[in-house]
Image (cartoon, rainbow, N blue to C red):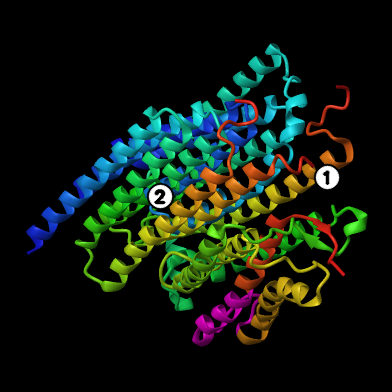
Amino acid sequence: MSLALDLLTILAVSAGVFFFLAGTVGLLRFPDALTRLHALTKADNLGLGLVVLGLVFQEERLFAALKLITVWLLTLLAGATVTRLIARNARPAGPRG
Amino acid sequence: MAEFLLAAAGFVLGMVALGLVRILWGPGDADRIMAAQLLGTGGIATLLLLAEAMHVPAAVDVALTLALLAAFVSVAFVKGSAGSEADGA
Amino acid sequence: MSDATVYGLCSAVLVGLGLFGLIVHPELLRKILAFNLIGGGVFLLFGVVARKGAAAGFDGDPVPQALVITGLVVAFAATALAVALLRRLFQETGRTTLRSDG
Amino acid sequence: MVFDIGLALLIVAVAVWTIAARDTFAAVIGFVAFGLLLALAWVRLAAPDVALTEAALGSGVTGVVLLGASTRLRHAEISAADKKPGAMLRAAAAVLCTVVSAGLAAIVLVLPHPAPTLAPQAAANMAATGLGNPVTAVLMAYRAIDTLLETVVLLLALLGLWSLTPDPFWGGLPGRRHHDDPDGVLTFAAQLLVPVGILVGIHIFWVGSVAPGGEFQGATILAAMWILAAMAGLVDAPPVSRRWLRLILVAGPAVFFTIGLAGFAMAGGFLAYPESHAKLLIVMIEVPVTLSIAATLALLVAGPPERMPQQ
């Protein structure tokens, strides 16, 4: 049982880490701010979600597992809000480059 | 398992480091705020992985705090960046 | 070389960097930032000494750790006050530096 | 070890950026990143209490204060930027700073092993307090006088800040009035985040007696949530002349000082707790201190009053 859980953890965390890689590549390579925004927030929030999922398999106490999920939900909410605000508010190019 | 999680934490941190290059390049405030967000998400993932790898459950509380404060700082960044035009003094 | 020593060397570099910024930046806000970097370096040094002083079943000496928490709060208060002074200086004179000759 | 070297290099790189960036706004983002990475370093140094403080206060709230200043002074800095000191002075400063760094590095390398430590004394003291977190025990009992003085220092900083108020706004409201976000995203997020954040703040404060956390960390989160609500236009700051506000500000230090004085009668010394009631007394101090610190931090972020209440 513990071995199976360990395996699930390794799978989920590896997949999560891969999405961080994808997000970073997008942030570096995509041509303009809005597409970068798109690449970054989706990939990273998914990456964090998979990392959280992997760690939940290692948690024995319910409260600790819930706390991990809360961290992810808070990050999602913050990410969605800020992304929306950036897309609407922030000037795509700064005042002096 | 601990070594794997520590390695994963190191890898995420490495990705964050690469993303920080975007702060250097900019060119706009939007990119810089995004890079700060990447840093927040990546930092949270790193903390959660460290908490499990080092058996420091308190690091999850640090991640929780960071998640809240990252939202707070990002909102302030966006508000400040958008508002700086309007009130110069 | 232990893990803590790595952070000890890091803290030494941070203090030097912050000091450099404090001296060469004419803008006061950059000086405040540099001052906070020095603070970060000094606090980290405390953390290294605390880690190396692990004893009595603790992973680190709690006394310097508690001092750093106190220090962080005071550093924040000092920063907030410095920023308020700077903003008032800007309101009164339109300047963000201390140079009066320029 | 590899992880630590990588993290240390990254911290140094971000610090270099904070010093070298041309744009102050970019430098401030560098500083926030710096604080976040330091929080990771504190976890690695087995100091999660400090990591919490760094994440909340050192990076987050300090970052917001510096950011506010950088956007307000943005138009001034362009004219001031050309007055850089000459090459000679810069070279001299570089030499001086290298010497300082080298000296500190040498001290780190020759630190005795094991380093001098107060951990045994702190452990002995902790047993008498009934607390499970050694750092909280140091803050509230072993070195309680430092913590008491610190709450006073925070108040003094706030007095200093208020004394910078321009005459017409004396006793007025700090900060700008933010209005509800027209398309509702921020309002919605704040309505969700603020209650959760308040719960997290209380949780961090409450576990501080047995696990990493405590009044400073909890208070910082509470202060941040109030400012977030203000930025979303959900609440507005009260005029700083309100009596209830002043009462909240001084309640913590006053209760702390009073119980400290009572220590003379109860246990024969200032800030001494009788062993049977130590934990109860510490909680009685911590609750008002947390509220006072939260209010003080929030008002320090808000800045000096800059408008009067609307009639």
3D distance between C-alphas at marks 1 and 2: 42 Å
Q: Residue furthest front?
A: D183
| Residue sitting nearer the eye, B51 or D96 | B51
- The answer to which quarter of the image holds residue D282 is bottom right
The answer to whether residue D228 is visible is yes
Q: Which residue is mark 2?
A: C51
Please report the residue visible at 88 percent of the width from the left and 36 percent of the height from the top: C93
Q: Earlier in the sequence, mark 1 or mark 2?
A: 2
Chain bearing mark 1: C
Q: How many callouts does the rendering have?
A: 2
The N terminus of chain D sits in image quarter: top left
| Residue sitting nearer the eye, D222 or B72 | B72
**Amino acid found under the numbered disc labelled 1:** Arg
State which mark lies toward you, 1 or 2: 1
Please report the residue visible at 40 percent of the width from the left and 48 percent of the height from the top: B41
Chain part drawn in magenta: D267-288
Q: State the image coordinates of residue D72 (x, y, percent, origin top left).
A: 73, 42
Residue C88, numbered label: 1
Our reading of the magenta stretch's main secondary structure is helix
